[in-house]
Image (cartoon, coloured by chain):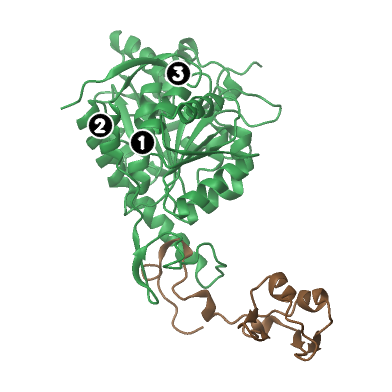
Chain colours: A green, B brown
Amino acid sequence: MAVKQIVMGLNGDEAVAWAVKQSNVDFVAAYPITPQTLIVERFSEFVANGEVKTEFVTVESEHSALSACIGAAVVGARAFTATAANGLALMWEIVYIASSLRLPIVMAIVNRALSGPICIHCDHGDSMGCRDSGWIQMYCEDSQEVYDTVIQAFRIGEHPDVQLPVMVMLDGFVLSHTLQNVSILPDEVVSEFVGYRKPIEIEVPYLGKVPMILDPDNPLTFGPLDLYDYYYEHKMQQHDAMEKARPVIKQINEEYYKISGRKYGDGFIDCYGLEDADIATIVLGSTAGTVRSVVKKLRSKGLKVGVLRLRTFRPFPAKEIVEALKDVKVIGVLDRCGPFGGFGAPVFLETRAAFYDETKRPLIVNYVYGLGGRDMHPALIKEVYDDLFKILETKRIEKPVKFIGVRE
Amino acid sequence: MSELKGWREVPIAGICWKLSTEFKTGDWRTFKPVIDQNKCVKCLTCWIYCPDEAVEWDGEKVTINYDFCKGCGICANECPVKAIEMVLE
């Protein structure tokens, strides 16, 4: 039974701050960057007002923010940070270190275009750049989902089988600065759901079983040199953890549904109109809502169209996508990320690869859109579906990658 | 390297299954510091400066732990009475 919740007018950044406030977070270090700034501002207010017991550390850069989170997480704290675009780029080295040290840090990424030219508006180029950094990546459609996903992220990352950091993505400005009604769970319900971080146990011959934390009484060495004889084995363990995260993401999605009454598809994909669809699009983030409204209109005219919103991008739900779209004839993959020099943009590439082994393969095309915050309005989405209908008719792909909404 | 372990056997996150003190790093050294106990005034300046905690003080005598001293020579450089000499290994 879902519990009674209060509805608050929050923007996406505030939704993050509220989720962190309620999730028994021990440590936050962050450096402000548009459009992530409000997360840090709101959270520092909670700290100043004594509403949380969190240790809040202001740092001089994002590189230090994530480094400080690593330091906290390695002694057993639940740590959180948030950034965007250039801030994430400055963190780069530490992003990989967090995942390889297997620290379940949660980081909100407010998606923003990477410079240059310098731009503060939304696209997914920042987080897509680190899609193979060993972090779980979840993309949210609205501020409610942002709130819900940040809470879930602590449970997912800290699961004993997983022990990986989690990035929760929200679209810059579209979500981060836009007011929305967000249902907030009671503090004690969230607190009980997320509990407190319990470090896993590790066995080393000289100590036996000890908690996997830095502790002078049970000395462990974190982050030593690792050469060709063991580096590969440690990378294999990270891959294994990603595979083990799959059932956990689904399980937490269901568990959260029980307390909140909200769930997001199976935790990985969220389908609409796919039961009988000949044509479907795949989309991430806030654009999904606009696409769904276009699909509703088209379906009301009797057109067999649908949309699959990809919520979890890492680990990539290849099987789930193939199963959901197995009877679809043409798929348009919407990517808010440039493909510079590649065969296509990231979601498109993974989707095409996922279908390669299938005997019945749909035609799959890529639509790049919305770079630097360029609006993806209903008329443009309608153009995409019109184009997909043309491909369905001719059964021919003239250009696998198209750029939507750019002026000629 | 003796028996190499598989990825399921080693601790995650690259955590060592041996104490770092089992890895003797003193063989990186080219010059070794030798203390002239007659000159030493037991000021412990070398003990403070040693970046590897390889200078040991037992309450009576200053000695060098050659298992971990890498021969950087900072102790010899800092010694106010020049009691430490760097000797080619």
Q: Nearer the viewer, residue A299 or A230?
A: A230
Q: Nearer the viewer, residue A245 or A33?
A: A33
What residue would you read off at disc 3?
A11
Q: Earlier in the sequence, mark 3 or mark 1?
A: 3
Check contact, mark 1 vs mark 2: CB within 8 A.
no
Is A103 located above or below residue A392 in the figure? below
Residue A206 is drawn in which quadrant?
bottom left
- Check the residue under mark 2 and report the chain it is in: A
Is A373 located above or below residue A107 in the figure? above
Under circle 2, the secondary element is: helix
Residue A333 is drawn in which quadrant?
top left
Left or right position of A191 against B29: left
**Which residue: 69% across, 26% down?**
A118
Crowding near the residue tagged with mark 2, few <14, some 14–19, many ≥20 C-alpha atoms within 10 Å: some
Q: Amino acid at mark 3?
A: Asn
Residue B89 x, y percent position in the rendering? 76, 90
What residue would you read off at disc 2?
A189
* Separation of marks 1 and 2 at Cα, in angstroms: 10 Å
Residue A123 is drawn in which quadrant?
top right
Q: Amino acid at mark 2?
A: Val
Find residue A23 and name its label: 1
Left or right position of A78 against A337: left
Res A363 visible:
yes
- Check the residue under mark 3 and report the chain it is in: A
Give the foreground label among 3 and 1.
1
Q: Earlier in the sequence, mark 1 or mark 2?
A: 1
Q: Amino acid at mark 1?
A: Ser
**Which residue: 60% across, 25% down?**
A34
